[in-house]
Image: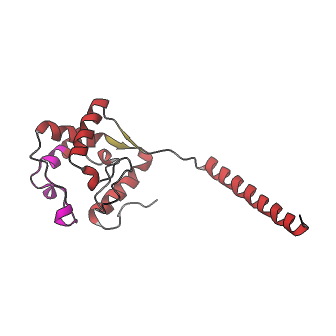
Amino acid sequence: MRAGERNIYILIAIIVIALATYRGIQQAKDPDPGIPFYTTASTELKKRAEVLHKEHDCLRCHSLWLVRNWMESVPAPALDGIGALRSEEWFYEYLSAENPQSILPSRLKPEYRMPSYAHLPEEDRRTLAAYLASLQVEDWFLEDVRKAHYEKLTGEPYPGNDH
């Protein structure tokens, strides 16, 4: 190995060590707080809601637990943390409305707007409402959820505080 090659290897090693040290210091200063989304739903409620969620193809438009149907490009709000923004009673009224846009206007094309679930049995609407209300977010991430939800609904920048 020639002296020039050795110097290049030493320089690369120093850069790698410096970057690793910098990353370690950054992580120590600002550790990853983890996934901010969780549910307060019981196992039974989760199972019943999952059946309804699949039956009505909710992932066609919405994401949940950061999972989305990538074949669709409907800009519907994510359901992660949605329960921190609305109450169970609000969800029940929304799902029971003949015209959900009368409660929450939509900027989407008519074919992509939230359909009415007023035709579903009351028990199913209550199950979905309870489950949606159980989808919570950690306090430290709540403002980000509000911002994302607002921007999806309106297409406008969030008027609240930016981080």
Q: Quadrant of the N terminus?
A: bottom right
Pick the front one: 51 or 122: 51
Q: Nearer the viewer, residue 129 or 143?
A: 129
- Residue 155, given in percent of the width and then of the height, sits at 30, 67
Q: Residue at x 14, y 48 (%)?
A: 117
Q: Which residue appears farthest toward the front when viewing the image?
A: 1
Q: Is residue 10 left or right of residue 149?
A: right
Q: Position of residue 23 (x, y in %)?
A: 65, 54
Q: Is residue 131 above or below residue 29?
A: above
Image check: 160 left or right of 108? right
Residue 87 x/y as whole percent: 24, 43
Number of numbered callouts drawn: 0
Is residue 113 within the magenta segment? yes
Q: Residue at x 73, y 58 (%)?
A: 16
In the picture, measured across the screen, residue 136 lies left or right of residue 55, that is right
Q: Is residue 128 above or below residue 97?
A: above
Residues in magenta? Answer: 92-116
Residue sitting at 30 percent across and 39 percent down?
Answer: 134
The way the protein has been coloured in the rendering is secondary structure
Q: Quadrant of residue 121?
A: top left
Asked whether, in this view, residue 48 is left or right of residue 37, the answer is left
Front residue (pair 141, 119): 119
- State the residue at coordinates (63%, 53%): 26
Estimate the x, y position of residue 47 in percent, counting from the top left: 28, 34
Tell which residue pokes out farthest to the right in this image: 3
Is 16 part of what is drawn in magenta?
no
